[in-house]
Amino acid sequence: MSPASTVAHRIEDYAMIGSTHSAALIHRDGTIQWLCMPRFDSEAIFASLLGTPDNGEWAVRATDPAARIARRYVPDTMVLETTIDTPTGRAVVLDFMPTPVDGDLHELVRIIRGVEGHVDFAAELRLRFNYGEWIPWVERREGAIFAFAGPDAIRLSSSVDLSNANFSTTSDFTIVAGQSVATTLEWFPSHKIPPLPRDPYALLRHTEAQGRLWAAQCTYDGPYAAVVRRSLMTLKALTYHPTGGIVAAPTTSLPEDPGGSRNWDYRYCWLRDAVWTLHALTVSGYMEEASAWRWWLMRATAGAPDGLQVMYGLHGERRLTETTLDHLAGYENSRPVRIGNAAHEQLQLDVYGSLLGAFDAARRDGLADMDAVWPLQCAIAERLLVLWRQPDCSLWEVRGPKQHFVYSKMMCWFAFDRMIASAVDFGLDGPVETWLWAL
């Protein structure tokens, strides 16, 4: 068996798979190094991306170190296809995360198919809960391996023999042409009994069909259409389906500069992204997703327009308390590793323009029921009349004294400009003269 890798990897060598609830990052060598379940912002069970293999990962790779690897997504899906060529044969690995049926069972499936000759494989699974800190209690029953730690539980079902030793689960096997093997990792609440495992091959067919059906709804027919569809699918994969919130990224603490300390948790929903995301979805034909994002924006900001935050949690949570995880070395030794984000307490005036601009764009793009949003828009604009002359932290989220930023002032202007345009163009009631004075 090839040893677990301890060499830092380039960010561009990772691919993402997702279920619209959570996501995983897979290195091109076949190692899943980041996975949070059941939500994007849950505690990671694979965290070697920010530490070492002992912080949790799942490696599936050919034993031949000279194996040639090519990767792509199965067209119009989030199914990752890795083709492995060795002197003895060729095999394909398919990694995907099915859409959950409910909130109590979340799956990650790895299917390996033999294409030509034979390929020898080695797999090693190291489950570590609480961001790589806890080694779970493990037992074998019902033909599967179960792991428990606090509120979380994992069931691992596989069509290859698995062995447990040294706090990891391993397997060595050979795939021949025409043969397939499948392994499914399922998260469920540790106090519950999970349902019977679903058929991984049926899940693959369903996931591929679901992706193609969604991609077929795209109305964009301009330059780089395939790239646009792939970008839209990524937005979809970053959407938390239960609420419609869209996370900025599925990861935390990847550094702005390797070895530096500007390592932030981006597993939250930023208002700053709202206008561009809404517009991209509506003009591409995805009104259902745009509407869900719009209602998320309204719910998250409603009730406290005088305290608009730059970001919120997946359900619109306002308290995103920041702390550090000292047991993790960080990506390329970039410390500290942070969870939570203290920037949620900052005054960032540009988000007012982003939010009001998003609502204006949604109205112009034909999103239904926008009249229900207008009172909230007016309340936000009223608050901005008081705030816009103040210094802030702006989109750079400066952790120091507030300053006057040109970008923030420009976005405040944009906020009032869009409110005036909405009132005039759609016949909406509002203090237009007051907003004009603010300009």
Image (spheres, rainbow, N blue to C red):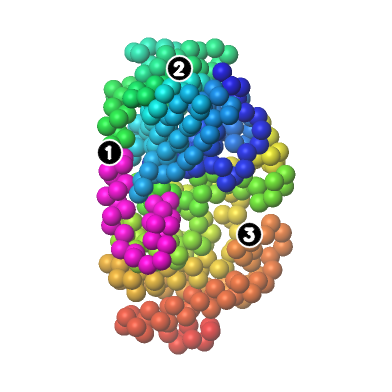
Q: Are marks 3 and 1 in contact (CB under 8 Å)?
A: no
Q: Position of residue 332 (x, y in %)?
A: 69, 39
Q: Is residue 70 above or below residue 281?
A: above
Q: Position of residue 252 (x, y in %)?
A: 57, 44
* Mark 3 vs mark 2: in front: 2
Q: Residue at x 34, y 13 (%)?
A: 142
Name which residue lies at 31% across and 40% down: 207
Answer above or below: position of 359 versus 245.
below
Main structural element of the magenta stretch: helix, strand or loop? helix
Name the disc covering residue 206, or none. Answer: 1
What range of the chain is rendered magenta? Answer: 206-235
On the rendered structure, is 1 left or right of 269? right
Q: Calculate the distance from the C-alpha at mark 3 to the C-alpha at mark 1.
A: 42 Å
Residue 52 or residue 110, whichever sits in front: 110
Dot 2 or dot 1: first in sequence order is 2
The numbered dot on residue 173 is 2
